[in-house]
Amino acid sequence: MNTNEFIEIVPDIDALDEKILKLITKNARIPFLEVARECGVSGAAIHQRVQRLLNIGVVSGSEFIINPQKMGYNTCAYMGIYLDKATFHKKVVEELEKIPEIVECHYITGQYAIFVKMQTKTNKHLKKLIEEQIQPIEGISRTETFISLEQEFKRQVPVI
Amino acid sequence: MTLRNHLDEADLKILNIISRNARIPFKDVASEVGISRAAVHQRVNRMIELGVITGSGYYVNPKKIDYRTCTYIGIFLEKGGIYTDVTEKLKEIQEVVECHYTTGQYGIFIKVYAKDNEHLKSLLSEQIQKIPGISSTETIISLEETFRRTLPVYS
């Protein structure tokens, strides 16, 4: 059996790439000239490096980070999903992806089969979502929800 | 519907665009929304002041920088009162990327990225489980992050 296909090749990232990543992951709109000055190379070099990092998939894009609470999304919850049969997995995930309030979806080990993260406006909204959209999905036998009362912090993986 | 924080239609349109691409020139945002470039600047600054926008960044794919194991860990505490002390200690561990105070069986629920299972094991036994106040942990490994996205700006 060829096992190579299971190995994700880690691209070559040198110290300069790491330095650039450190700066641009904390502020996406930082002028590349400023990054260049800090790294001691030309602005063109930074452009080229960032483009390369995008091309090889190390960075997948940029975003302004929105505070969910300020948008009226006050309830954050995690849910473990049990399936009737493991083979339902793919179909269930397709259905889950149609629900915009589900912001993360994982295929996991342990007691649950699928694990999702949800952002809803209120607890009532959450209840409605579970009752009317998630539980009717064919193949889901039951769900277990826990609500996050407070998100203490959220950040990205350490680059170095 | 009254919009939260007095955000209007134009604000939501701007958020929709810049939450997906932070480096888009504000000139382009302006033409898409149908307002002036200066107005986009002004609105973005206002949303930063209001705390609607908490920052910006490039999104790093953890797998590509050698973080191959993604896990959720449920933490049981010896008693509820030590919650803040424990979260402070957890914050010192770089690999812990999210931390929640939850209802249900666990006291604290965290998301952790590790380089491999061995790294995960050492994080658990040498760092997380050594924090005073943590009685036990339950680890769920994510075999695949099927999708991940930001929440819908439009409802």
Image (cartoon, rainbow, N blue to C red):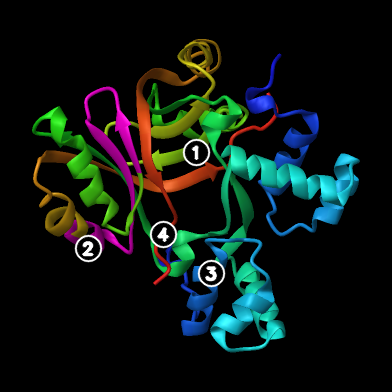
Q: Secondary structure at mark 3?
A: helix
Place of residue A114 in the rendered image (x, y in percent of width and height, measured from the top left): 41, 33
The quadrant in which the N terminus of chain A is found is bottom left
Same subunit, tags 2 and 3: no
Q: Is residue B68 left or right of residue A42?
A: left
CA gap, disc 3 to disc 4? Answer: 14 Å
Residue A21 visible to an observer of this rendering: yes
Same subunit, tags 1 and 3: yes
Place of residue A130 in the rendered image (x, y in percent of width and height, measured from the top left): 48, 16
The quarter holding residue A53 reads bottom right
Q: Residue at x 26, y 56 (%)?
A: B92
Q: Which residues are magenta?
A: B99-122
Q: Can you identify the residue that label 3 sits on?
A: A23
Q: Which mark is residue B100?
A: none
Instruction: Report crowding for label 2: few under 14, some 14 to 19, many 20 or more residues within 10 A (C-alpha).
Output: few
Q: The disc labelled 3 sits on which kind of residue?
A: Leu
Q: The disc labelled 2 sits on which kind of residue?
A: Glu
Q: The disc labelled 1 sits on which kind of residue?
A: Glu
Q: Which mark is residue A157?
A: 4
Q: Secondary structure at mark 2?
A: helix
Q: Can you identify the residue that label 2 sits on?
A: B118
Foreground label between 1 and 3: 3
Is A77 included in the stretch rendered in magenta? no
